[in-house]
Image: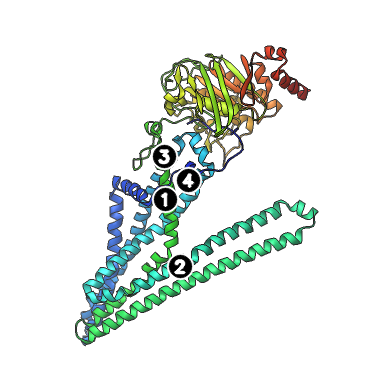
Amino acid sequence: MNNQVTARGPAPVSIRATDLLPTATARETRAELVARLRRAPLRPLLALLVTVANVVAGLLVPRALGRIIDVVAQGGHAVSAITGPTALVAASCLAQAVLTGWGGALVARTGEELLAGVRESALGRALAVPTERLERSGAGDLVSRVSNDVSVLADAVRSLVPQLASSVLQVALTFVALIVLDWRFAAASLLVVPLQVVAVRWLRRTSRPVRVAERLALGEQTRAILESTEGAPTVRAFRLEKDRLELVGSRSRRSRDLALRATQIGTRFFGKLNGAEWTGLSALLAIGWLLVRDGDVPLGTASAAALYFHQLFEPVNGLLSSFDEVQSAGAAANRLVGLTTLDDPDAREAGLAPSPGAPSARESAAPQAADGAAAGDGDFARARTGEGATPLPSQRPSPVGSGAIPVALEGVTHAYVPGHPVLHDIDLRLAAGERVALVGTSGAGKSTLARLLTGIHRPAHGRVLLGDRPLESLRAAEVSTTITLISQETHVFAGPLRDDLRLARPGATDDEMWAALDTVRARSWAENLPDGLDTKVGQAGLRLDPIRAQQLALARLVLADPPVAVLDEATAEAGSAGSRVLEAAAERALRGRTALVVAHRLTQAVRADRVVVLEEGRIAESGTHDELVGAGGVYAGLWEAWSGART
C-alpha cells in the first residue's frame, strides 16, 4: 500500500452504507474467537478448570455449614463432631482466595492475548487494503475501530470477561448443587426467572432512550462550552456573555436531569431484581419448611439450599446489570473482527492480512511506508542516489525491471463522484529516467493524477503502465517495490530515528542509513542529535520541523530505492529558504529514477526535463520550461504570476 498523501479530490461527499468497512455478524465473531482459542487451548482450558475449581470450593461451604446445623439439631455437643465440617469451611475459603486470584489472572491473560491477536490481524488487514477503499469508508470509521472499539474491548477483557466467566459457572454449578440436594429446591429457585426477564425487558425499554438522550445532551453541553470559550473575544465584543451563560446553563441542566433519570431507572431496576430475589428465597424457604416438616430432608440440607440460593444473588445481578456492557463489547468485537474479513489476496501473500482466524503476521513484506517507501533487502547493487553516495543494497527486485523504467497513463479518465470527472482522457508517458514537473492551478487534478499513477486510485477508464505492465496486473507488493509516493504531509513515527528510517528497509545497516541521510543533506543535523540514530523522534520525543521531517521522508525514499518516484508538493510546507534545501535534497534523491513532481513552486519546473500543465483535468501544454514560456500560453501566465509574486 502506498504512503499517505494529501487529498486533492472534490469536496467530501456523504458515505454510502455500501462504502463502510464490513462489520462481522455475531456468528462470525464467535467463529473467529473460537478459532483463535483453539490454536492455543492450554491457557483457556487451564483458566476454565481453575474457575470451576474456585466455584466448587465455594459450593462446599454451604454444604459444610448444613452439616454443622444437622449435628447441632440432632443434639450433638462434642467438638469433634463439627471439627471436620469446620476445617472444610476454612480450607474452602483459603482455596477460594487463591483460586480467585489465579483464575482471574488466567482469564484476563487469555482475553488480552486474544484481543491482541484480533487487533493485530485487523490492523494488518486494514493497512493492506487499497487506500481508495479506506477513503471511501472515511478515516473516522477505521480510527474509531482501532481506538474506541479496542478500548471498549480492553476494558471488557480486564473486568467484564473474568466477572462473566465466574458468574456463569457459579450460576450453572449452583443450580446443579440445588438439584443434587433435592430437585424441588431447584424448581423453587426458577420462580425468579420470569421476574428477572420482565425486569431486563423493562430496563432495555426505558434505559436505552434515556442513555442516548444523555449522550446527545453531553455533546450539546460540550459544544456550547467550547464555542463559548473558543469564541470568547466575539462573545465579549457583542456582549453575549449572559446569553452564552444561559445557553450553557440550560444544556448543563438538561444533561444533569437525564443523568438523574438514568440513575433512577437503575435504582428501580435493582429494586425489581431485589423483589425477584425475595420472591425466590421466600418460595425456597417455604419448600424447605414443608420438606423438613414431612421428614423428606434434614434441616441442614434445607439450610444449605437457602445459602446456595443466596449465593446466586451476586452473580445473577452481575450478569443482568452488565447487559449493556455486554452489548457494547459485542458490537465493538463485531466491528473489529469485521476488519479481518476485508479480502485482499495481495495482503495475504505479503503476510499483512492473514485469513480470518489465521495467526497474525509477525514478519511481513511490508508495503510502502508512509512518506517513504517499500521495505525489503537484498544483494548489494549500484545506488541510484547520485555522486558521493555509498552504494546501498537493492530492494526486492521490481517485477517490471531494474533501474529507471518508463511509465504511462493511456486514455485515463477518473471521477470521485460518478458523472463528475476530475481528469479527462489523459495521455502521458514518462521515459525511463525522465523527470516531469506537473503544474496547474489548485483543483486542476494534479494530486489525483499522482494517486492514479501510484495505484492509490484505479482509473474509471483507461490504464496505467509501469514499464510494459498494466498496473492492475501487479500485486500490491509489486507496486510498492516499483513506485513510491511522497506527499507534503510527512508523518514522523514515534521512536528512535533508526527505526523511522528502517520503515523503508528493515535490514538497513547504520552505514546505509547514514549514506541515505547524507544523500538528502540531512547527515549534519542527524549527527548533532543527542543520541544520533538512537535519538527518539516524533511524539514523546524530538519534534522535527517540516524541513527535517521531509528530509527524513526523502531518506526513506533513498533506502527504498524504487525505479519510479512521485513527489506530490513535497516542498510545499517549507518556507522560501527551506524550499531551496528540500528541492536540492529531492533532486539528489531522484537521480537515476523516473520521476513525476507535482510542483508547488515553479522553480522545480525550471529544472525538470519536461513540464506538463493541467487545466480543468486536461493536459493543456507539454514541453520544456523555455519552450512553454516562449509559447505564451497557460504556463507562461503561471510563470509570470509566480515571478511577479517573488519580486
- Give the SS element for disc 1: helix
Q: Position of residue 527 (x, y in %)?
A: 58, 28
Residues under labels 4 and 2: Cα distance? Answer: 30 Å
Q: Are marks 1 and 4 in contact (CB under 8 Å)?
A: no
Residue position marked by numbered label 4 in the rendering: 146
Residues under labels 1 and 4: Cα distance? Answer: 11 Å
Residues under labels 4 and 3: Cα distance? Answer: 15 Å
**Marks 3 and 1: which is nearer the front?**
3
Mark 4 or mark 3: which comes first in sequence? 4
Mark 1 or mark 4: which comes first in sequence? 4
Residue position marked by numbered label 1 in the rendering: 333
- Mark 4 Cα within 10 Å, few/some/many (few <14, many 20+)? some
Q: Nearer the viewer, residue 616 or 152?
A: 616
- Mark 3 Cα within 10 Å, few/some/many (few <14, many 20+)? many
**Marks 1 and 2: which is nearer the front?**
2
Residues under labels 1 and 2: Cα distance? Answer: 23 Å
Residue position marked by numbered label 2 in the rendering: 203
- Mark 1 Cα within 10 Å, few/some/many (few <14, many 20+)? many
Q: Amino acid at mark 2?
A: Leu
Q: Amino acid at mark 1?
A: Ala
Mark 1 or mark 2: which comes first in sequence? 2
Q: Amino acid at mark 4?
A: Val
Mark 3 or mark 2: which comes first in sequence? 2
Q: Position of residue 146 (x, y in %)?
A: 48, 45
Name above or below for residue 551 compared with residue 28.
Answer: above
Left/right of residue 144 with respect to residue 36 in the rendered view: right
Q: Nearer the viewer, residue 587 or 641?
A: 641
